[in-house]
Amino acid sequence: MNHRLLLVAALALLTGCSSTPEPPDLGKLYNRSAQYHGPDRNPVIVIPGILGSRLIDPESDRVVWGAFGGDFADPSSRDGALVCALPMERGKPLRDLTDSVLVDGSLDRIKVKLWFVPLELNAYLNILGTLGVGGYRDADLPYDTVNYGDDHFTCFQFAYDWRRSSVENAKLLEDFIEAKRTYVQKQMQKKFGLVNHDVKFDIVAHSMGGLVARYFLRYGGDPLPDDGTLPALTWRGAKHVERVVFVGTPSAGSLFALEKLVHGLPTAPTLPTYPPGVIGTFPAIYELLPRARHGALVHTADTTAVVDFMDVQLWKMMGWGLADPGQAKELKRVLPRVKNEDARRAIAVDHLEKSLTNAKRFHAALDVPASPPPGTELFLIAGDSVPTPSVFRVDLIKGSLDVEQEAPGDGTVIRQSALMDERMGGAWRPHLVSPVDWSRVAFMFEDHIGMTMDPNFADNVLYMLLEEPRD
């Protein structure tokens, strides 16, 4: 037999021995653990990412986000843009710029009549399906993946106004946990005779929801001080939290946030785009920007020179976002009481500067290296198989943005951002350098949404919550 025939025979043998494995039977694997509802099993709080909560305006009786048919707030209309955008006013801090919009639960509770469904909603529903297999139920849900009895207190959904700063939402999460803790304590007393049981929660946080959770763990509901310093790192939020599973969280940001702030947020071919003059009023999106020190933005003249895109002067020079002269029409819609165009632009640029400053301080608060207290563990599930934009190149004359480099990720968040890898833009070292002390990390070979549909994702999450030994 010649060498070619030997090679063919060897390949045939290898091919015959290999096969695609079937996905695991999660019901069989976790059935017994799922049915166990003892007092030492933690309730789970699910935190969705951006776009994952329904927003309504009670004054106009319209849906601001979460319904894409009928009388919803259309950001391309004059009154719709005013409802969708957050208020802007010079001389007022971001936290005081409030409107009448209210949170009306999580988006899993509605039926989207159009073919388009927000990507974040898809991921959120997939996570809820995984938890359903694990026996986690929420009485507010109109369905159950698996019915394991009346222990519906084992799962809660934290809905929040994803337009506002994650610092503000961390305070709301603190209040939410205190209320649910009291509720669960009453259930424990009723079911097991335990008085004032020391209730601990597990959290599953997707995408931007992980940033809310990270800030909450470190600082509870403390705001960023007005004097520009950082809040005291007390780990107050970790007091009642035992395990957090971060799913595709952009711990070091995502370049897609910059792209959306500059170009707007498209939804679907049959639906309007949310223009920069509207989404630029949302402080939370600026908090999704990458760190300048990681070298995510370079310019055409010298691609080795790092551009600080957190500098408001750059945005003014480039005409980006709220500083874009082309947004004059949108600014007139969101600032109807300001009659002068120059005055509207000055208010918008002031809001832009406040949002960038807030984001830089938010990043600094999260970037302080620290390990959580004993008994609190941080788990990460991230994608690292999809080429994802990691560096944008900006033309300083034209103001255009183009992808300069890609890196492994999930198509939205690069692997290094999920890990909060400080080796980005600096000297390489053989081991991870991160301000986040991860207890365990699992990587998925899927995109930002696809990984939440993967059986490997469900297997990992259920093991982390139900069976992995705890300190």
Image (cartoon, rainbow, N blue to C red):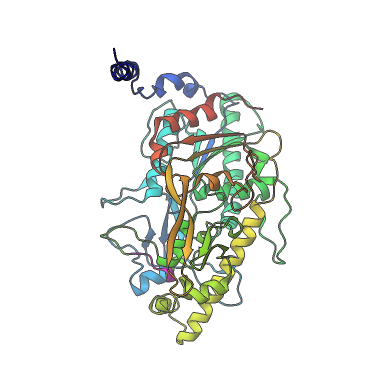
- 370 horizontally vs 424: left or right: right
Q: Nearer the viewer, residue 350 or 422?
A: 422
Q: What stretch is highlighted in magenta?
A: 273-277
Q: Which residue lies furthest to the bottom in this view?
A: 340
Q: Where is residue 57 in the image (x, y as percent from the top left)?
A: 41, 63
Q: Position of residue 18 (x, y in %)?
A: 35, 19
Q: Which residue is drawn at 36% across and 51% down?
A: 118
Q: Residue furthest top?
A: 1
Q: Which of 76 and 110 is in front in this view?
A: 76
The total of numbered circles placed on residues is 0
Question: Can you see residue 179?
Answer: yes
Image-quadrant location for residue 60: bottom left
Q: Nearer the viewer, residue 188 or 349?
A: 349
Image-quadrant location for residue 200: top right
Question: Can you see residue 221?
Answer: no
Q: Position of residue 228 (x, y in %)?
A: 70, 65
Q: Which residue lies furthest to the front in this view?
A: 2
Location of residue 204 with respect to 150 vertically, above or below: below
